[in-house]
Amino acid sequence: MDTRETIAALAALAQESRLAVFRLLVQAGPEGMAASKIAEQISVTPSALSFHMKELSHASLVTSRHEGRFVIYSANFNTMNGLIGFLTENCCGGNVCSPVSACREKEGLAT
């Protein structure tokens, strides 16, 4: 993933509804979710969802397919993994590292 693609993905995710949609689709897995179900889950109108899906699609974060009269959206895991890879490239100066989870920090288990 190059810098231009990374900026497009981050810009698309830098909005509350789009971030919620993307996280929902990641949870749904490769089978995805119908647009109507997405709109219901995040409480947006179909027209607002259409706008958000266009932005996520232009950033290659989601894909769509038709099943009958439904549009099914799925997270684009290749783009997601590319974004994570770009952001963590050469993490910790190239040394193996593992981020401490927020739960472990709250529990006082962080080392």
Image (spheres, helix red, strand yellow):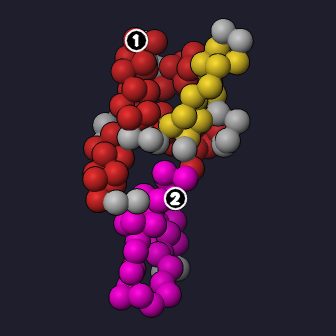
Residue at 62 percent across and 25 percent down: it is: 65
Circle 1 residue: 47
Where is residue 60 shown, x and y percent of the image?
A: 44, 41
Q: Residues within 10 Å of mark 2 (few under 14, many from 20)?
A: few
Residue 24 shown left or right of residue 6 in the figure:
right
Secondary-structure class at tag 2: helix
Magenta-colored span: 78-105
Q: Is residue 85 magenta?
A: yes
Q: Nearer the viewer, residue 24 or 77?
A: 77
Residue at 28 percent across and 53 percent down: it is: 4
Where is residue 80 shown, x and y percent of the image?
A: 49, 53
Label drawn at residue 81: 2
Amino acid of disc 2:
Asn
State which quarter of the image contains the N terminus.
bottom left
The relative height of residue 38 versus residue 19 in the rendered view (above or below) is above
Q: Is residue 90 magenta?
A: yes
Asked whether residue 111 appears in the rendered view, the answer is no
Where is residue 23 shown, x and y percent of the image?
A: 51, 42
Amino acid of disc 1:
Ser
Q: Residue furthest top?
A: 69
Asked whether residue 30 appears in the rendered view, the answer is yes
Query: What number of labels is visible?
Result: 2
Which circle, 2 or 1, is nearer the viewer? 2
Label drawn at residue 68: none
Residue at 50 percent across and 37 percent down: it is: 62
Q: Residues within 10 Å of mark 1 (few under 14, many from 20)?
A: few
The relative height of residue 99 versus residue 19 in the rendered view (above or below) is below
**CA distance separating discs 2 and 1:** 29 Å
The relative height of residue 100 versus residue 16 in the rendered view (above or below) is below
Magenta stretch, main secondary structure, is: helix
